Structure formats: structure tokens, C-alpha cells
Image (spheres, rainbow, N blue to C red):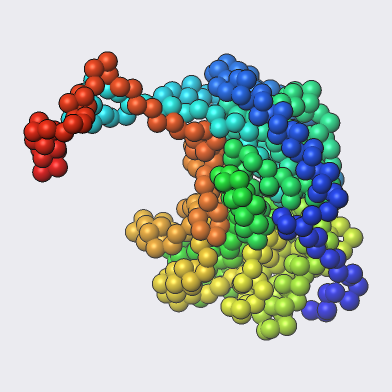
Amino acid sequence: MTRIFDSIERSRPRDHRPDAMTQDNVTAHGALEAALALQRAAYLADPVPSLARRREDLRTLQRFIREHKQALCDAISADYGQRSRHETLLAEIFPAIDGIDHAVKHLRGWMKSQRRAVDLRNFFGASNRVIPQPLGVVGVIVPWNFPLNLSLVPLTSIFAAGNRAMVKMSENSRHLARLLIDKLPAYFPPEKLQVFDETGGVGIEFSKLPFDHLLFTGSGTTGRAVMAAAAQNLCPVTLELGGKAPAIVCDDFPLRSAAERILFVKCLNAGQICTTVDHAWLPRQRIDEFVQLAREIVPARYPLLSSPDYTSIIDQRSFERLLAMLEDSHARGATVLPLLPGPAFDAATRKIAPHLVLDAPADSLLMQREIFGPILPLVAYDRLDEAIDRINAGPRPLAIYPFSHDSATVQRLLERVMSGGVSVNDALFHVGQHDLPFGGVGESGMGHYHGREGFETFSKLRPVFYQARFSTLKFLMPPYGKFAERVLALLTR
């Protein structure tokens, strides 16, 4: 492999530290504070919207998506340079529309107060309830990789819970942000929903606002900074981060099926998915067979690198980072295998062919960092315990993907390898199940949303105790006498 940076000018990453104060920050801070004040005043005036109001908000959001479906696809593709329209429909438009249907169907049940048991020994005649109530104003910081899904799916949970929302888009989603900023005010007033572009300093100031809850999706490094900024206001956070999600292919599973499913997910959005297969563990004797299958499967799906079904890398910095990973692995003795005919990458369109990498050193860039691109390292194991121990030696991933038809083996992997979520005998698709919570664990995140868990994340599950007309505690009030002594002795025996 020739050196890949000979003709590429390196770009300098921007400073997004929450403590960096510039004039842009000052301007952004004023606009954001005004928006938050407007929404908080509206919340205080109507703190618990009715079921009908919430359903209307959800249907309005769904109507917006349907009425601007093509424009949304076009805007996202423009932000990428080339993004498959079908991938946008499959991974962004459909989950948002379908998720709203799910929320509308179940919302009445979610909103019901829950009866809880009462300690009758002390509180005869009293009752307990848990009442879900809106938190108020929720902030959402959206990444660039699935910017529509990761803005509108959270909004579904936020509106279902009766809240108002401020949404901050990524600097890499300028076309989509402009579309949302221009079109959404015809559907929602500013006291209900406002969307902000990243024009410089906005993200820094956004994370400092005293929201009632803050949802961030992105890298662990930025997630730490966001959490530190939110902590100054004791603002609760849900962090959806990432990590090195492994597929673990066991010897009993049909290898062609595993290869077809893993490679579909790995090539989807050119691998720019936090829950994609980062790398795959395979029995040592099946590595060569997997390589041959990949060389058949990938060209059949994407005959050329220029295929409109294959998505570009989001920006120049990410493009260079992925090429640097390939170069680092090659320079250190790994076998780097492009899976498409012709050039391995196209600098003009920022497309990188899907690659397999064999024998990447454990301390290489590919094996140490989240890849977030169309590069799949294959890691051989002789005993399943080797894979388990290696995975457990690193940070807990956002997902794991066991491939086995042996229920005991699957259960063993579920019990011994902790992760945010799991898809068994496939990858990624647990994220698309509306009735399953989505979230990380440890360095891959904290908190959940989607479905009922999303409703509960953005609600205060408020415990309420209703005392009976006559309180039996009257007999246990001071001055304490022999009766109180006998009762307390009985209760504490």
C-alpha cells in the first residue's frame, strides 16, 4: 500500500471544550438562554399536557416527516456528499414514522398512574401511586451520522412525555439543520420546539444550559465534556456513546449467513454507525472461508465504489483518519484486503471501499479505537474464552453480536460479556425494536430511551403518598409512652 497522505492536506480539529469562551459563545449563549426561558415559561403555564395534546404533537411530527421526506433525504445526502437515499429511508425516515405509531398506540397506558403497595402495619387506609409527569424542557445534542433518526426519535419520547425541546444539530449537518430550522416552525411554535445549527460556540453553550434533562449522542470524549458541563447545573444526562462492538461467530453457525448479515451492517452508511460491527471474532480455521465469502458478497451489493447505494465518509478529517488506520495496520504487518474492484478509495467523493484486515496487532489504531467506517478487522480465536477475555479486558461496548444456534453458548456470552444491548444471530437490529430500550453501559453510555423507557427517561416518575382520613400514626406521636414502646418493639422484633 502506498503512503496515503502524500496528496492530502491534514485538517485541524476544532476546539469544542466547554470552557473555551469566544465571542461566538457569548452570542450563542444569549440566544439559547432566551429560547430556554421561553420554553420554561410555557411549561410552567401548562405543565401536564393532555393525552390528546401529546398525540397531536406526535402526529404533527409524523406529518412533517411525510411531507418533507424527499427534501430530508436530499439534505442529508448533501451533508455527506453522497448518502444512499434508500439507507436514509430505511435507517432514518422509517424508524421515526414507525416509532411515532408505536408511541401513539401505547401512550394512554404509559401515562397511567401506577398503584403501589402500602405498608398496612403503619399506614392503614392510605394509598400509594407513581405518577409520570413531564420534566419540562429537554435538550438534545444530535450527531451527524444519523441526524434525522437521532433528533426525531428522541423527540418522539420527549413529546410523548409532555415536554418541550431544544435540539442542537451537528456542524456536519448544515443542510439538514437549515431545512429543520426553516420548515419546523410551521408545525411547532418556538415555545414547543426549537432547532439550532452549530455556527460556532453553540454546542459549548448548549451543554451549559440548566435543562431539566439533556440527551447527548456522540463520542466518549465529547460525552465526558458534556457531562461535566451539565453537572454544574445538576442537570441529569442520558449519554449514548459508542465503543468497539464485536461480532462473535461460533463454529456451529452457518458462515455464509454470518458473513451476509455482518457485511450488510458493516457497509450500511459506510460503517458510520455507533452500533455497527466494529470487528469480528471467528474460529481460526474459518477466517479464510469468511474472506472468500466477503469477496463474493460485497461486490455483488456494490459493483463499483461509485455506486449510489454506497455512502461517502462524512468529512475530510474522518476520511483521513480511516486511511491512517489502514496505513498503520499495513505498516505493522497486517493484511489489508479491499473488497471492491478498482481503487481502494476516491478522495474526490470521500468514498473508501469496504476492507477486511487480518492479523492487526492488538495495539494498532484499528484495534484500540472505534473504527466508525467500512473497515472490518477479523480476529481469530482457538477457544471461545479467548474472545470473552479479550473483550472483557476493554471498555464495555454499546453492543455485542453473538452468532450461534446453541442456546447454551448464547447464554454463556450474554452472562459473561456485558454490553449496552445485544442482537443474537444478527447485528444492529435490536436498536430498531420500539419495545426494547436503547442505551449503553460504562464507557458506552448511560441511561435508556426508545419506547416506554424513552417515555420514562423524559418523565418524572413521581411518588405520591395519600394519607387516610384517620392516621394510625397518631398513636406513635410524642410523648412516647408504654403503648408506643410495645408497638415499636413488635415492629422491630
Q: Position of residue 372 (x, y in %)?
A: 68, 60
**Residue 216's spot in the image, x, y percent?**
64, 48
Q: Give the vertical position of 198 relative to 192 (above or below).
A: below
Write the residue at 66% across / 80% down: 334
Instruction: Write the residue at 78% across / 46% down.
Output: 202
Which quarter shows the C terminus?
top left
Residue visible at 79% across and 79% down? 1
| Percent x, y of residue 135 | 56, 32
Looking at the rendering, which quadrant does residue 86 occupy? top right
Residue 239 left/right relative to 177: left
| 115 and 419: which is toward the camera | 115
Which residue is at the far front? Answer: 479
Q: Seen in the image, is 108 located left or right of residue 223?
A: left
Asked where in the image residue 343 lies, by quadrant, the reply is: bottom right
Residue visible at 72% across and 45% down? Answer: 206
> Where 314 falls versus 166 (above or below)?
below
Please state if 111 lies on the left or on the right of 79 as rendered.
left
Q: Tell which of 227 and 106 is nearer to you.
A: 227
Residue 279 rendering spot, x and y as whole percentages? 59, 66
